[in-house]
Image (cartoon, helix red, strand yellow):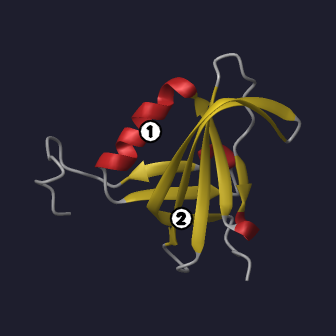
Amino acid sequence: MANELPFAGFELKEYMVIFRQSEERNFGGVVANIRGLVRCTGVGVQDDAKYQLDVFFLADYSDVPEPQVDLENKSGALFLPMSDMFTFVDVLRNEKPIYGHLRGDNPQLTSVTTTNEPIGAGDEDYEG
C-alpha cells in the first residue's frame, strides 16, 4: 500500500559508508560526481515498513541534483558536499535516536534529524 501522506518519517537503524574514486550518475538530467555515499535504512514511525535514504557526497566541482523522494518505494536521496561526509557520519555514530524525513510535498525539506537534547548532555548522561 502506497503512503497516502505526502511525507514519511522513519527511525534510522543502520547505515553503510561507501567511498568512491569518482562515479558519475545522472539524477533527473543532472550529472553528479559522487565521491561518497552513506546509505541510511530504518523503520517507519507510522507503518513499521523499511525505508532508505541515500546521502550522496559530491566532489567540489560536481553539479548538485535536487533531492529525490519516492514515497511509493519508501526511498530518497540527498546531495551534500564531500566536506560534510565526516560530520554526517559522526552524527550517525554518536546520536540516538536519529530520524529520516522523506518529504514528497517539498523534497528540499527531506532531512536527517536528531531529537531535542538538553545543552551539555553527553550521550551517557541523557536518558530521554
For the point 67% across and 66% down, the residue is: 74
Return the residue at label 2. 9
**Residue 89: percent from left, percent from top:** 42, 41
**Residue 25: percent from left, percent from top:** 80, 37
Q: Residues within 10 Å of mark 2 (few under 14, many from 20)?
A: many
Residue 16 disc label: none
- CA gap between label 1 and label 2 equals 18 Å
Closer to the camera in the image, 27 or 108 = 27
**Residue 61: percent from left, percent from top:** 70, 16
For the point 65% across and 22% down, the residue is: 59
Q: Quick check: 113 above or below 8?
A: above
Q: Quick check: 51 above or below 121?
A: below
Q: Residues within 10 Å of mark 1 (few under 14, many from 20)?
A: some
**Residue 3: percent from left, percent from top:** 69, 74
Where is the N terminus found, in terms of image quarters? Answer: bottom right
Q: Secondary structure at mark 1?
A: helix
The amino acid type found where label 2 is placed reads: Gly
Q: Quick check: 80 above or below 105?
A: above
Q: Secondary structure at mark 2?
A: strand
The amino acid type found where label 1 is placed reads: Phe
Name of the residue lying farthest toward the bottom? 1
Residue 88 disc label: 1
In the figure, is residue 117 to the left or right of 5? left
For the point 14% across and 47% down, the residue is: 121
Q: Of circles 1 and 2, which is in front?
A: 1
